[in-house]
């Protein structure tokens, strides 16, 4: 089992594995998204209070969940890269950042659009929204710090420290609705206890969240491969790999 | 069908959210692919240059 | 150097001794460069002056925004002072010597940052009641204002130190420094300004102040290590 892990840390192997996985990940994501969208837009009954506007939940919540999960993946990968000095882990962290940033933008935008009919305002400076905005700044700061170093190794390690320091914001976003009296509604799904949302409204949400995760993994495959190519500039294994990519296309 | 599109009066809000989501998801997919293709192109060029010059090390070609 | 105890070579300097030596050095250097110490303070006053000019000279209106204005101005002034925290010492190789000395770099950087706070943060804390009064704050709020800023500027110095260590090797990195550090400092701003705001309305301030204290303790415990790791990367 550990042999597999060590193999995966080798760039050529990771490059090919990512290339092979991507179609599977992407197509399952697409199928699940269609199913979840159908469930959320057609099958699920309108909400008692929010009527049909609640259907925004099926894109807003998965986007928001991903905005935090991707950051955790980023921070963990960066930590692994710094502690065990695995270059590929740094590549994973770098690859995560733009995807996570866009999820955060999507969460903020869909949340804002949802907020207008529900709360009467496009924006509120309450803890959940504010900390999610800070999350976006953390992503942007991470990418800005990365790009300010010419040397990839230094960029990797400096941005890793920033990522780890910033991970403190993730629990703040997650628990902000519990810790403070927030305008944003409380958690509808929790690991323990029954969810406060009916099952025909719940399953499309869970399906969409899974779909978003698979989608993230699919996009990550491409981005990791780009990062590997950028970093392995002079490696001899590259020429063999080029023909595989050409064959894929 | 019109009821579905109408979304109980919230059509503007719901469909703009879903539309935005589609744009962001497709955009990320497309840009990631494009970046990969660029990097593959560059790597291929580098490999070609190094084999053409007949040496193991790559030239100082800026990419 | 003539009166050396016989076993001086065998005696390692203690941690407090190291911290004290560094603090003394910082203070001595600061005395020689008073202008560097005074400038952020002047900036603080100037920025707070901008708001009455831009918004309204009416004290009743200014009173509402006074906590926020004082706090934001303090944050910006602290950002400016961060420029002089590490850069001069990295440029002349002092930090490199510290990193190679075999003594714990986190401790040395912590000592440097604490002294920097005494020179940059503490003056803000003392000046804040004056500026606050100019913006219509009642005297009764001064203790909470000074207290929240004392805790807050401590956090700002520590968090700012991490950002400064990360960007010290980046050319023209001051804007990047602000971009990195301000999001991390936002919770401090929220709690601090809220505490003063609550005090102005006569409500209990224990909540935000306790949170500020907790953040400060967290920063004191962890920031030195982040600073040290970042610094080692920057100076290599």
Image (spheres, rainbow, N blue to C red):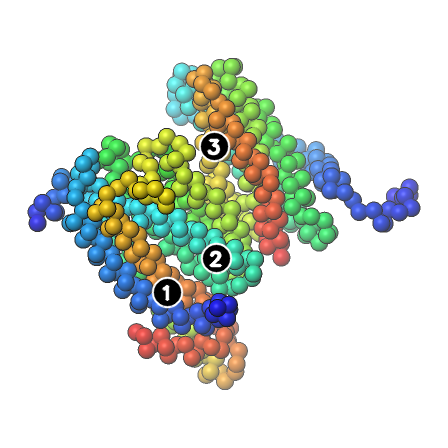
Secondary-structure class at tag 1: helix
Q: Please identify the quadrant where the N terminus of chain C is shown.
A: top right
Q: Residue under label 2, please give it.
A: A77
- Give the mark count: 3
| Above-or-below relation of C170 to A30 | above
Q: Residue at x 46, y 36 (%)?
A: C186
| Above-or-below relation of A78 to A138 | below
Considering every residue shown, the one lying at the far front of the view is A193
CB contact under 8 Å: marks 1 and 2 = no
The residue lying toward the viewer, choosing from A96 and A17, is A17
CB contact under 8 Å: marks 2 and 3 = no
Report how far apart the C-alphas of labels 2 and 3 lie in the structure: 30 Å
Please name which of the two marks, 2 or 3, marks the residue nearer to the observer: 2
Q: Please identify the quadrant where the C terminus of chain C is shown.
A: bottom right
Q: Work out whether disc 2 and disc 3 sit on a shared chain.
A: no
Q: Residue at x 26, y 32 (%)?
A: A119
Q: Work out whether disc 1 and disc 2 sit on a shared chain.
A: yes
Q: Position of residue C56 (x, y in %)?
A: 39, 21
User: What is the chain identity of the residue bearing mark 2?
Assistant: A
Report how far apart the C-alphas of labels 3 and 1 lie in the structure: 39 Å
Sequence order check, earlier mark of 1 and 2: 2
Report how far apart the C-alphas of labels 1 and 2 lie in the structure: 17 Å
Residue A222, disc: 1
Q: Is residue C44 visible?
A: no
Q: Position of residue A207 (x, y in %)?
A: 27, 53
User: What is the chain identity of the residue bearing mark 1?
Assistant: A
Secondary-structure class at tag 3: helix
Q: Residues within 10 Å of mark 2 (few under 14, many from 20)?
A: many
Q: Residue under label 3, please give it.
A: C189
User: What is the chain identity of the residue bearing mark 3?
Assistant: C
Q: Residue at x 28, y 40 (%)?
A: A196
């Amino acid at each position: 089992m550990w042999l597999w892990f060590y193999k995966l840390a080798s760039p050529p192997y990771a490059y090919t594995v990512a290339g092979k996985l991507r179609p599977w990940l992407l197509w399952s994501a697409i199928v699940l998204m269609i199913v979840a969208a159908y469930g959320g837009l057609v099958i699920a009954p309108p909400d008692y209070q929010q009527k049909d506007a609640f259907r925004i939940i099926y894109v807003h919540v998965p986007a928001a969940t991903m905005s935090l999960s991707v950051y955790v993946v980023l921070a963990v990968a960066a930590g692994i890269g710094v502690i065990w000095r695995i270059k590929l882990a740094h590549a994973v962290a770098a690859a995560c950042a733009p995807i996570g940033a866009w999820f955060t933008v999507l969460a903020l935008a869909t949340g804002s659009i949802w907020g207008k009919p529900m709360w009467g305002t496009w924006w509120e400076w309450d803890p959940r929204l504010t900390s999610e905005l800070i999350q976006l700044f953390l992503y942007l700061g991470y990418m800005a710090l990365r790009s300010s170093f010419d040397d990839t190794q230094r960029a990797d390690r400096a941005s890793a420290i920033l990522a780890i320091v910033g991970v403190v914001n993730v629990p703040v976003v997650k628990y902000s609705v519990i810790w403070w009296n927030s305008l944003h509604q409380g958690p509808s799904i929790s690991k323990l206890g029954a969810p406060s949302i009916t099952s025909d409204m719940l399953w499309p949400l869970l399906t969409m969240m899974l779909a978003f995760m698979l989608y993230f993994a699919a996009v990550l495959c491409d981005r990791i491969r780009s990062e590997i190519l950028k970093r392995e500039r002079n490696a001899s294994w590259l020429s063999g790999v080029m023909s595989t990519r050409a064959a894929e296309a | 069908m019109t009821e579905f599109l109408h979304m109980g009066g919230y059509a503007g809000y719901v469909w703009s959210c879903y539309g935005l989501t589609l744009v962001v998801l497709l955009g990320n997919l497309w840009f990631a692919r494009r970046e990969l293709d660029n990097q593959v192109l560059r790597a291929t060029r580098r490999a070609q240059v190094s084999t053409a010059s007949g040496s193991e090390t790559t030239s100082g070609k800026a990419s | 150097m003539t009166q050396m105890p016989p076993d001086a070579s065998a005696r390692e300097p203690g941690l407090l001794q190291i911290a004290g030596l560094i603090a003394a050095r910082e203070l001595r250097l600061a005395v020689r460069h008073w202008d560097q110490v005074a400038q952020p303070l002047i900036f603080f006053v100037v920025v707070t002056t901008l708001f009455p000019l831009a918004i309204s000279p009416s004290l009743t209106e200014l009173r509402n925004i006074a906590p926020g204005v004082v706090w934001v101005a303090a944050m910006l002034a602290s950002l400016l002072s961060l420029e002089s925290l590490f850069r001069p010492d990295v440029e002349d190789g002092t930090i490199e010597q510290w990193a190679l000395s075999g003594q714990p770099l986190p401790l040395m950087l912590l000592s440097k940052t604490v002294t920097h706070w005494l020179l940059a943060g503490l003056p803000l804390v003392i000046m804040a009641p004056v500026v606050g009064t100019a913006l219509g704050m009642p005297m009764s709020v001064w203790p909470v204002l000074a207290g929240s800023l004392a805790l807050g500027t401590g956090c700002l110095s520590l968090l700012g130190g991490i950002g400064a260590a990360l960007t010290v090797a980046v050319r023209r990195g001051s804007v990047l420094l602000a971009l990195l550090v301000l999001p991390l400092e936002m919770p401090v701003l929220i709690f601090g300004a809220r505490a003063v705001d609550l005090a102005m309305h006569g409500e209990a301030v224990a909540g935000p102040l306790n949170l500020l204290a907790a953040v400060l303790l967290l920063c004191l415990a962890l920031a030195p290590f982040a600073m040290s790791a970042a610094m080692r990367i920057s100076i290599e």
